Amino acid sequence: MFPAFLIKKVIFLTYTSIMFYSKYRNVKTTVFGKTFSSKHEAKRYMELKILLDAGEIFDLRMQVSYELIPSFKLDGETYRGIKYVADFVYKDKDGNEVVEDAKGMRTEVYKLKRKLMAYVHKIKIKEV
């Protein structure tokens, strides 16, 4: 028979390994039937929804994809393209397109994609 403390430890380790956490501990959140990858992104959506209803912004879109580097072949090997997916895209009162990212952690990949967005599309990402 196994000692009780060992059984408790195995149960605890099994339980904690079954719980799935995202890399940066963000919590998926659902608001108005839409699921967001973090509480911060959901909160920003609610703020933008209020601005949209008030007529301060127009044409609110979510998860808009921008191609940064197209896929290509080199010596018979295919390389996948690289894209950036914006959390929110909308038009302000002046008709300017605004690309927003609800950013919690600025990873190295994000920093590179932000620079590519500026270079390829001439778009500066607004971080909130």
Image (cartoon, helix red, strand yellow):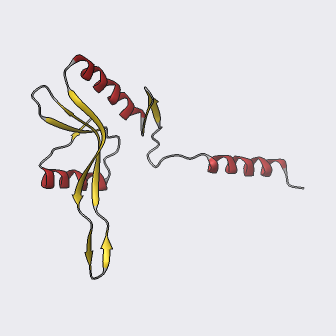
13 and 69: which one is in front? 69
Q: What residue occupies the far top of the structure in this picture?
A: 54
**Location of residue 122 in the rendering, given as x and y in whole percent from the top left corner:** 11, 49
Q: Quadrant of the C terminus?
A: top left
Picture residue at 68% right of the left edge, 50% below the top: 13
| Relative horizontal placement of residue 5, taking residue 101 as reference (left or right) | right
Residue furthest bottom as drawn: 75
Above-or-below relation of 70 to 46: below
Seen in the picture, residue 64 relative to 61 is either above or below; the reply is below
Residue extending farthest to the right is 1
Residue at left offset 86%, top offset 55%: 2
Measured as percent of width and height from the top left, residue 50 is found at: 29, 20
For the N terminus, the quadrant is bottom right
- Residue 91 x/y as whole percent: 17, 32
Q: Is residue 92 above or below residue 16?
A: above
The residue located at (30%, 24%) in the rendering is 49
**Which residue occupies 47% across, 38% down?**
28
- Residue 94 to residue 76: above or below: above
Q: How many discs appear?
A: 0
Rendering coords of residue 11 (x, y %): 74, 48
Compare residues 49 and 20 and report the one nearer the observer: 49
